[in-house]
Image (cartoon, rainbow, N blue to C red):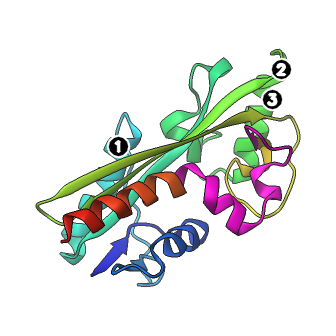
Amino acid sequence: MKIIFATQNRGKVQEVKAIFDGSQFEIISLYDLGNNMDVEETGATFSENAFLKAKAVYDHYKEPVLADDSGLMIEQLDGRPGVISARYAGENCTYEDNNLKVIEELLELPEPHKAKFVSTAIFYDGKNTFEAAGELHGIIIKEQRGTNGFGYDPVFIPDGYEKTISELDFEEKNKISHRAKSFEKLKEILTQKNL
């Protein structure tokens, strides 16, 4: 079955294609289709935002869709940046802008800065909606380290590790990431449903 992955983010595309590799599902991203459709994320939760993306892409192509929404939640910041993780430092901000804003907000607060990455993955085909969630717990550090990740990866050290996610290789990251967990669960659901 061909499924469109509602993202332009090449890092996400690589991660999710690796998860579904060898399954009966062929993942084709908006990036592969040359479509830079941008869905406004107006939901109050990761789940709502993921569904908004899935439905918009389904309405456009009338093909089954995968979508996700994910973000960083920091304990000492009352769960911020949360659903606005991608634009935490303002519209059109860079990953670097977001990381610097988080570091600055944590400067006066005692360490460790406990945090978690959260991902909600959704499958939608016009009649069925399936959803799965994944989390990765760790701490935020006050310097950016590593070049292998994107988003908040350079400032996030997962529990049980000494390296940031950006310092891990792709295979290692894909084993433990919040996104990998949510999409692995979703793949299991889709395989069992035998659509």
Q: Earlier in the sequence, mark 2 or mark 1?
A: 1
Please say if 180 is above or below 160.
below
- State the image quarter where residue 5 is shown: bottom left
> Which residue in the structure is indicated by mark 2?
111
> Which residue in the structure is indicated by mark 3?
104
Q: Nearer the viewer, residue 6 or 90?
A: 6
Locate residue 22, reporting x and y percent.
45, 82
Please name the amino acid that badge 3 sits on. Glu
Eye-nearest disc, 3 or 1 = 1
Locate residue 60, reporting x and y percent.
23, 72
Q: Nearer the viewer, residue 193 or 107?
A: 193
Q: Can you say which quadrant of the picture contains the C terminus?
A: bottom left
Q: Is residue 128 magenta?
A: no
> Which residue in the structure is indicated by mark 1?
47
Distance, label 2 to label 3, CA atoms, is 13 Å
Secondary structure beneath disc 3?
Answer: helix
Measuring 34% from the left and 65% from the top, which residue is drawn there?
66
For the record, the magenta segment spans 157-179
Give the crowd class for mark 2: few <14, some 14-19, many >=20 residues within 10 Å: few
Q: Nearer the viewer, residue 137 or 7?
A: 137
Please say if 155 is above or below 116.
below
Judged left or right of residue 107, residue 38 is left
